[in-house]
Image: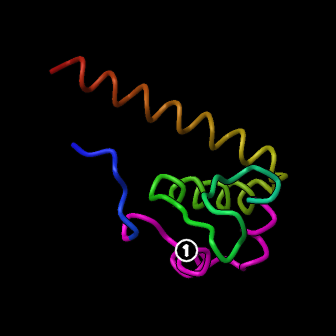
């Protein structure tokens, strides 16, 4: 398996907003606050992975459902990502 990523493996800011039905400003603010990871020097160059897509969807849902602050939604998303990783390790170990 190669560690080299291809341009098609990433989403642009506009694509991520479209896929998640987000307002552009919502995403820009959270990236600038360091709550959502992006590669690239500016919002015009930002690229997002499919893992980030899941994080964005989770954070948005947490913010809306629980009226949570962005920082709290990011913390919960961190914990859910860790749970996903632990479950994946358990599945690999049980084979």
Residue 77 location in percent, x, y? Answer: 63, 44
Front residue of this view, candidates 17 and 90: 17
Q: Does the magenta stretch include residue 13?
A: yes
State which quarter of the image contains the C terminus: top left
Please name the residue shown 24% across and 24% down the image: 92
Please name the residue shown 34% across and 51% down the image: 4
Q: What element carries label 1?
A: strand
> Few, some or many C-alpha atoms within 10 Å of disc 1 (few <14, some 14-19, many ≥20)?
some
Please name the residue shown 54% across and 55% down the image: 52
Does 67 sit above or below residue 90?
A: below
Q: What stretch is highlighted in magenta?
A: 8-30
Q: Does the magenta stretch include residue 95?
A: no
* View extreme (top): residue: 93
Please name the residue shown 49% across and 70% down the image: 11
* View extreme (left): residue: 95
Residue 28 location in percent, x, y? Answer: 76, 69
Location of mark 1 (residue) = 12
Give the image quarter of residue 42. Answer: bottom right
Answer with left or right where residue 17 lies relative to residue 43.
left
Residue 56 location in percent, x, y? Answer: 61, 59
């Amino acid at each position: 398996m190669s560690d080299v990523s291809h341009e098609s493996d990433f989403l642009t800011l506009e694509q991520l907003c479209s896929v998640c039905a987000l307002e552009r400003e919502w995403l820009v603010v959270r990236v600038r606050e360091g709550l959502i990871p992006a590669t690239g020097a500016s919002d015009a160059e930002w690229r997002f992975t499919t893992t980030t897509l899941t994080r964005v969807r989770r954070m948005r849902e947490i913010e809306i459902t629980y009226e949570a602050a962005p920082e709290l939604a990011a913390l919960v998303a961190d914990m859910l990502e860790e749970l996903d990783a632990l479950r994946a390790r358990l599945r690999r170990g049980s084979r």
